Amino acid sequence: MRWLYLILALLFLLLGIIGLFLPVLPTTPFVLLSAWAAARSSPRLLHWLENHTAFGPMIRDWRRGGVVSRRAKWLATSFMGASALYMLYGVRPLWVPLLAITCMVATLWWLWRRPERFADGSTSAD
């Protein structure tokens, strides 16, 4: 099972990195999934993820209380909005972008319901 979790950790990390460059693919969920799988397979990879300048704060915030910063929420909303407009303009048949936009709306609904502050009132580290 350790090898399966390691393969998943690396796959999720790769998808997260690709998501940095493709607005349709989210980065944060894949990085969080990568950390989850790395915790079950590779202490070295987990340590690298937790101490990474870009990935570390989101992993620590999530673990500390499911916190997502307002900045991250606005970035996700902006990129999903831009992706939705692009797909409406350039993807046919129309049901394909409408299905993707429905998924984006559901994701944004969930995301904006996540706390922005910890229980002690402090804000996210990033």
Image: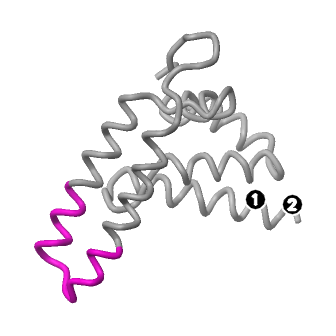
Amino acid at circle 2: Arg
Residue in front for this viewpoint, 6 or 74:
74
Circle 2 packing at 10 Å, graded few (<14), some (14-19), many (20+), is few
Q: Are marks 1 and 2 in contact (CB under 8 Å)?
A: yes
- Does the magenta run of residues contain 55? no
**Residue 83 placed where, x, y %?**
24, 61
Q: Which residue is mark 2?
A: 2
Q: Is residue 65 above or below residue 27?
A: above
Give the left or right position of residue 126, taking residue 11 as reference: left
Where residue 27 is drawn, which disc sits there? none
Q: Give the quadrant of residue 102.
A: bottom left
**Residue 52 placed where, x, y %?**
56, 32
Extreme residue toward the left, this view? 89
Residue shown at the point (41%, 65%) measured from the top left? 103
Q: Give the quadrant of residue 107.
A: bottom left
Q: Give the quadrant of residue 24.
A: bottom left
Extreme residue toward the right, this view? 1
Residue shown at the point (63%, 28%) measured from the top left? 60
Q: Which residue is mark 1?
A: 6
Q: CA distance from mark 1 to mark 2?
A: 6 Å
Residue in front for this viewpoint, 20 or 81:
81
Amino acid at circle 1: Leu
Give the left or right position of residue 50, taking residue 122 as reference: right
**Residue 121 placed where, x, y %?**
56, 11
Q: Is residue 104 above or below residue 115?
A: below
Q: Which residues are magenta?
A: 82-99
